Amino acid sequence: MGALDDVRVIDLTRVLGGPFATQWLGDHGADVIKIEPPMGDETRHWGPPFDEGTGAASYFNGANRNKRGMALDLRQQAGRDVLWRLLETADVIVENFKPGGMEKWGLGYESLSARFPRLIHCRISGFGATGPHGGLPGYDAVVQAQSGLMAVNGEAGRDPVRMGIPLVDIGTGMAAMSGILMALYERERSGLGQFIDMTLYDVAVSLLHPQAANWFLSGKRPQRMGNAHPNITPYDAFPTATVPVYIAAANDGQFVKLCSVIGAEALTRDPRFHDHPARNQNRDALRTALIPYLATHDGEVLAATLMAKGVPAGPVLDPPEVLTHPHTIHRGMVTEADGTKVVGNPIAMSRTPADATRRRPPRFGEHGREVLEEAGFTAEEIASLIADGVVP
């Protein structure tokens, strides 16, 4: 039993933010029906690599497990009629059409809520429907640039750098899932659904911590600092004899322990480094002083030793090293669904754990007949919908 076994989700989303949210809902038991347009979710083609068995790109597979899949042409009235039928048993609809798109088809929140007052409607868009950027399209990298995230990412004195993962899309998916769960909880009291207006821009701005808080208080423009932390030092990646190690000595006690492990006790007696405010004022000098002590150590051994002493530290690993690491495997964060390896779900619940392996990502239109039959369509109606291209 999953925590969301009695929840049905109609998923009209494509690409990443929406599919990520509905995938996590599916991991926890929700019946997610992914409805693709006739041309399919474009991420099916965002490869290589491609799955030899299904032809889908890895990008699609990584965000669409634990869903049943069908296709529906909402440009046709018959397609919209099908959607209305499917919504009769739905708790949630999630979509990421450009604001105004659903309204154009008579499927805006006002229309949906009038017929289904308990329905929760989550829309994910770039910037929302109103405001100076209202209605504009939004993609992760563009929003990273417009939200200030790129401006604080990268080396000092160098150009801003896009983060190596689509953090805004993924963060928006997580926030959307949280909003959906809150709306489901509130519905238990009110008996009513509601509209959830999620935007990539809002989520990106919300992630500007601590830079936003620092600027509000100091008025100083945040700067790019590479791997260093703007408020804490030493909190940075350092070279060793083998792999780089990230060391996060966030308080005076941890700094003393760090110096003891690497044989740099003399630094604790240096007035430039005797407490955190002093270290922060002399962060460049501290980094320069630490590097010779660290240069002779094996990075992974050093990180393990520091962690055992209570100093947060870890080697800088590549994704393949992480995905094959014994702790990753022990935590169930790599698992397999019908021959497809997937990253597990991190929300570990004691009685109703997530299951990332219930369903492999669906083939295009794979469950169309099954979903229509459950909704009460006859064999003749289904054959007609397929012949007319309403259900590809």
Image (cartoon, rainbow, N blue to C red):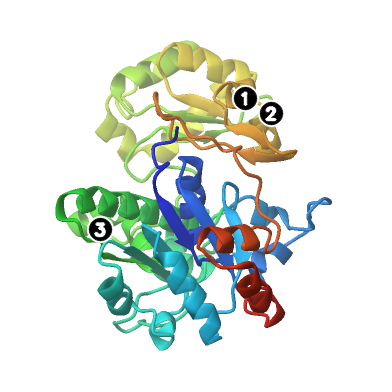
Q: Quadrant of the N terminus?
A: top left
Res 338 quadrant in image: top right
Residue tagged 1: 329
SS category of the residue bearing label 3? helix
Image-based side of 198 in relation to 296, left or right: left
Residue tagged 3: 215
Q: Is residue 77 above or below residue 29?
A: below
Contact between labelled residues 1 and 3, with CB atoms less than 8 Å apart = no
How many numbered callouts?
A: 3
What's the amino acid at mark 1? Ile
The Cα–Cα distance between marks 3 and 1, rounded to whole angstroms, is 41 Å
Q: Earlier in the sequence, mark 2 or mark 3?
A: 3
What's the amino acid at mark 2? Thr
Q: Is residue 382 above or below residue 334?
A: below
Res 127 quadrant in image: bottom left
At 54% from the left and 16% from the top, the residue drawn is 304
Depth order, front residue of 125/69: 69
Contact between labelled residues 2 and 1, with CB atoms less than 8 Å apart = yes
Q: Is residue 184 visible?
A: yes
Q: Is residue 264 visible?
A: no
SS category of the residue bearing label 2? loop
Mark 2 nearby-residue class (10 Å; few <14, some 14–19, many ≥20): few
Q: Position of residue 211 (x, y in %)?
A: 32, 54
The circle drawn on residue 24 is: none
Depth order, front residue of 65/344: 65
SS category of the residue bearing label 1? helix
Q: Earlier in the sequence, mark 3 or mark 1?
A: 3
Res 14 quadrant in image: bottom right
Residue tagged 2: 324
At 25% from the left and 58% from the top, the residue drawn is 215
